[in-house]
Amino acid sequence: MRICGVSEKKLDESPVFEAEMGSVGIVETKSYTFAKPPELFELDNGEKLGPVTVAYETCGELNEAKDNVILIEHALTGSAHVAGRHKPDDKHPGWWDIMVGAGRAFDTDRYYVICTNLLGSCYGSTGPKSVNPETGKPYGLSFPLVSIRDMVRVQKELLDFLGIRRIHSIAGGSMGGMQALEWALIYPEMVESLILIATAPQVTPQSIAIHKVGVQAIMDDPDWNDGNYYGRGVPGKGLAVARMLGHITYLSDGILWEKFGRKHKNLATMKQDLRSQFEVESYLEYQGKKFVDRFDANTYLFLMRSIDIYDAAEGFGSLVESFGRLECRKVFVSSFTADWLYPSYQSKQIVNAMVAKDLDVIYCEIESAYGHDSFLIEHEKLTYFIKNFLNSL
């Protein structure tokens, strides 16, 4: 195992990252549908689902050998739209646009980048919001519970369709890291390397408890209607509260002091009015409202449960025993100092178990004040390390 670290001082000594370099330009969301009746897709829990559609986007060119593939896995509320824009006037590019493109961390001059929308999501892949062909109505709570392993197996169906038998590297942060790890565990012969960022082999009891509060907020919203709210008023209040709670876990005490401190509108008014007065309160309300406009409440419930139940050691006596299945040439693992949602000790659990199986692992604990969101924000530091890692393969 090699251990590296980066501080603000070390960052200044590394190459300057050009933010505007190498945009992938206009991209298109595609879809692939399989498991059409009667040949349904069997889930881990024994239930069957079909047809199954998976949305995906690609950047770069697939080489003749089809072995220059980098599969990027998104986190809880992400989508297949990892980089570029869908049209020239899009205000916002893909969720990891700064990392994907010519000359960027995932260099599309060299690699064929694929990102899929995971099973159970609401951005083009089959999920609770999708129409159940048997009823002609959205699945809602009749949608089966899906696991991280199910999500990966659906991605495997897509790669089979694309004729891809070998993956140069799989990268993911947070929930995306769980998918990347599971890929290497159930399809070890396909995965050459892994890039695991701010992730864990299983979530903590604290994380499950936080999820529970968000779940309860949604279910207690009178508009939730036992998940049958489609075509009616959405459970916006509950979903907004769940998002506000979740958003707090993505940040850190330090960054909240830096961004907001105890700034407020008017002290005299605060002593007379319970409504939001602190800037941090207004910020959370904005994040909650914005989320309601773009995400589905049932989807949020199902995806949080898939995170809660994930265990990389499932079916084995220990993580070390489970990792005996891995065949990766190399693994890069990174955590962030202020991340209390997926703290560094969880990344070290992954690293130690891999070292016990004699895998070639590089571990970097990156100094950052941004909390769990660091994997989306600290692009300069991650670019430096990921480029070096990919160049070493």
Image (cartoon, rainbow, N blue to C red):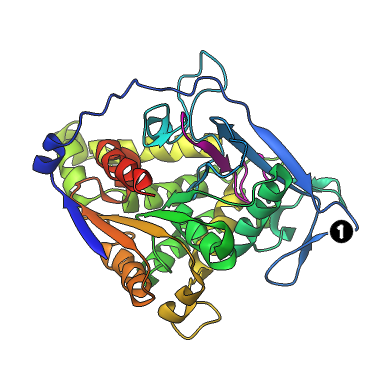
Q: Is residue 124 left or right of residue 11?
A: right
Number of labelled discs?
Answer: 1
Seen as rendered, the residue at the extreme front is: 65
Say if 254 sits above or below 273 in the image.
below
Image coordinates of residue 327 in percent, x first then y, are 49, 66
Seen as rendered, the residue at the extreme left is: 9
- Tell me where the magenta segment starts and ends, as one range: 109-125
Which image quarter: residue 275?
Answer: top left
Report the residue at 50% width, 20% height from top. 25
Nearer to us in this view, 15 or 100 = 15
Image coordinates of residue 188 in percent, x first then y, are 55, 64
Nearer to us in this view, 337 or 255 = 337
Which image quarter: residue 269?
Answer: top left
Report the residue at 64% width, 52% height from top. 165
Q: Is residue 213 left or right of residue 11?
A: right
The residue beneath circle 1 is: 39
Local secondary structure at mark 1: loop
Q: Quadrant of the N terminus?
A: bottom left
* Residue 111 shown in magenta: yes
Asked whether residue 260 appears in the rendered view, the answer is no
Q: Is residue 367 left or right of residue 248?
A: left
Image coordinates of residue 75 in percent, x first then y, are 47, 49
Which image quarter: residue 117?
Answer: top right
Seen as rendered, the residue at the extreme top is: 89
Q: Is residue 383 left or right of residue 54?
A: left
* Residue 43 shown in magenta: no
Asked whether residue 184 appears in the rendered view, the answer is yes
**Predominant secondary structure in magenta?**
loop
Image coordinates of residue 354 in percent, x first then y, are 37, 71
